[in-house]
Image (spheres, rainbow, N blue to C red):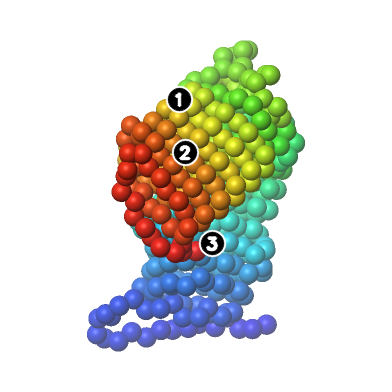
Amino acid sequence: MQRFLTLILFCSTLPMAAQTPLPPLHDGIVIDQKAEFRQDAPLRIAGRVKLKDLTLDLLGPVTLASGADFELEGVTLKVSDPRGTANGTSGLFCDGPAKVTIRRSSMRPEGSAHPIWRLKGDLTVNDFQTENSEFHLDHVQGHLENFTIFELEISKASHISGKNLHLVFLSTHTGASEKLDFSDIPVDHSFSQKLQMGSEATADLTDTSIQMFLLYVHGSSQANLSRIGRAQLAIAPSCRGNLRLPHGMVGAAGKPLVVPEPGASDCPFRFTLQEVNADTWDVYAGKDADLTFSDSVIDELTGDGQARLTVKNSEVYADWLSLGGNASLQVENSTVGAQRLVASRPDLATSQVRLNGHSQATFEKAVFDCGVLAGGNSTLTIRDSAKPPAYLWRAGHASVTTKPELSVEDLGEEKH
């Protein structure tokens, strides 16, 4: 077995004029020094790698090879996304099952960055404090303690025990056809509960506090929710019809509210809500979805494939509003964006409209409370906005038309 080597980096007695580039991370390396390093290019980690008692500026994605053993101890991560790139660009991704251990560390995004880690394998966390960051767990066996994060998703046969967790979102994805029950999840105080999560995952939580329970329902799955302090409910529709996604305390004991309303669409999923504080909804539409949303409060809204979406008389927070493929979006008499709420609502980490591919978006008489970026070969039309976007950026071969005319900044070729 290869010995676990230690790389000791010596400093000059003179002050450093600039950050030091992170050295190549070969199997068996330990970088243990109270210094600041910088990584501009994408980073790939294979074998066993440990970073200890250092600061690392990350300006690109990190990939863990299958079988990698990656450890952070006493590390301060600063994460940035290049201007014009999508939120989460400078995240961490696993090619296959890997081992990740984190102790006494922190992660802070800079600018508009929003680090997203997609993990597989074994995970141990003891004292990891993050801001505006997400962990998404896929077939993970893990123990988490003294952990602060924006979103913790426990799905896909992951089995997690957690103690002293501080979450903005506790989330899970259903499988394609499941029946799940969630009840008595508070948001005003810590709780301890064993939960059967979606897609055959489990969570054994002790002294955990959350600000929002987030449930992603897929396919024809059915979810019964009761006595939930604050919920965000997410759908991935490829169906057709009219939907109203309610806001506020909905469903009385013994008299639940059912979404979608029977007969208004051919959507196969179902929510049954009793005494649920429905804060917002997420919509991730694809394939041949053809849906009209009215009188709704939507947090994230995305369209791909051939999806056709219409939004009327609604609020779209645009925490993540993006179009790709050949999707189209028509927004009428609605508020788009929620920058006004970011300071008071930590769940609203970002707010931007983003177009890519050959997508098309038309906004008529909209109140914008965010900026807009049109990229790829997309087409953007803004007519008679009650309040214009905070900024209008154009990249690639996008077409932007505004009436009356608004200022558009050209970013040139897109960054990936």
Instruction: Give the residue pinned by disc 3.
Output: 92
Q: In this view, does 260 lie to the left or right of 393?
A: right
Q: Which residue is drawn at 68% across and 48% down?
A: 156
Q: What residue type is labelled 3?
A: Leu
Q: Residue furthest right?
A: 177
Count up the numbered dots.
Answer: 3
* Label 1: element kind: loop
Q: What residue type is labelled 1?
A: Asn
* Residue depth check, mark 1 versus mark 3: number of the one nearer the observer: 1
Compared to 223, does 90 lie above or below? below
Q: Marks 3 and 2: which is nearer the front?
A: 2
211 over 143 or under it: above or below: above
Q: Which residue is drawn at 54% across and 61% down?
A: 92
Question: Is residue 415 or residue 34 the one in the foreground?
Answer: 415
Categorize mark 1 by other alpha carbons within 10 Å: few (<14), some (14-19), many (20+): some
Q: Residue, x 24% and y 85% (percent of image)?
A: 14
Task: Measuring from the top left, give residue 330's x and y in whole percent.
Answer: 50, 35
**Residue 186 visible here:** no
The residue where tag 1 is placed is 313
Q: Classify residue 381 by image quadrant.
A: top left
As helix, strand or loop, the secondary structure at mark 2 comes to: strand
Q: Which of marks 1 and 3 is nearer the N terminus?
A: 3
Check the image and report above or below for 244 versus 155. above
Q: In which quarter of the image is residue 263?
A: top right
SS of the residue under disc 3 = strand
Query: Mark 1 to mark 2: distance in Å?
Result: 15 Å
Residue pointed to by mark 2: 362
Q: Would residue 93 be visible to someone looking at this image?
A: yes
Q: Which amino acid does label 2 sit on?
A: Thr
**N-terminal-most mark, 3 or 2:** 3
- Please identify, in this view, whether the residue under mark 1 or under mark 2 is nearer the observer: 2
